Amino acid sequence: MRDPEPAILHRLLRRLALGEEAALEELYRDLAPQVFALLLRMLGSREEAEEILQDTFLRVYREASRYDPARGEAKAFVYAIARNLALSRLRRRKREPPKDLGLDPQDPEGEREEALGFWEGGREERVLAARALESLPPEERA
């Protein structure tokens, strides 16, 4: 995929600053794949990268009027927002204590039974869930 021309991205941010929502769609289409790749490398989690990608473009929408072409290209403006949001997420990860799920790695069967026990469904639902889990290949059960 080719990089969009800087002048095009500049115009899109200007249009967005004027409240033209269609410009956000175009900007997303042009930059989202590259921004997502950056976020995935930084965060190492597809789920978190997708979440931060959405937050990035929401922030771009809200702050488009702050874009100043004298300070850098439009792409750099979007990347800086994405990078800052990802860094905030990484700092938050460090502050959060690790979650102790109380699971015994030596007893995977016990884990499955315990996990099913937490589910408030009836016996029939638990049996169906157990069968569904057993039908998965071993590498997908974890």
Image: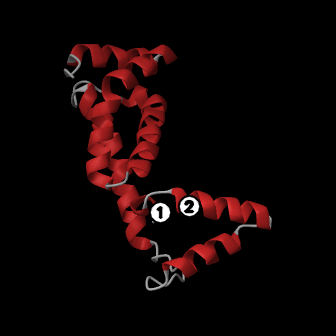
Q: Nearer the viewer, residue 107 or 26?
A: 107
**Label 1 SS:** helix
Residue 72 visible in the snapshot: yes
- The number of numbered badges drawn on the structure is 2
Residue kind at label 2, given as amino acid type: Leu
Residue beneath the point at 51% across and 80% down: 100
Ranked by sequence position, the earlier of labels 2 and 1 is: 2
Q: Residue at x 50, y 76 (%)?
A: 99
Residue beneath disc 1: 141
- The spot of residue 15 in percent (x, y) is 42, 14
Up/down of 51 relative to 31, above or below: below
**Badge 1: how crowded within 10 Å, few (<14), some, or many (20+)?**
few
In the visual, does 140 lie left or right of 11?
Answer: right
Residue at position x 53%, y 57% in the image: 135
**Above or below 37: residue 23:** above
Instruction: Give the amino acid at mark 1.
Output: Arg
Q: Which residue lies under the disc numbered 2?
A: 133
The image quadrant of residue 76 is top left
Are dots 2 and 1 in contact, CB under 8 Å? yes
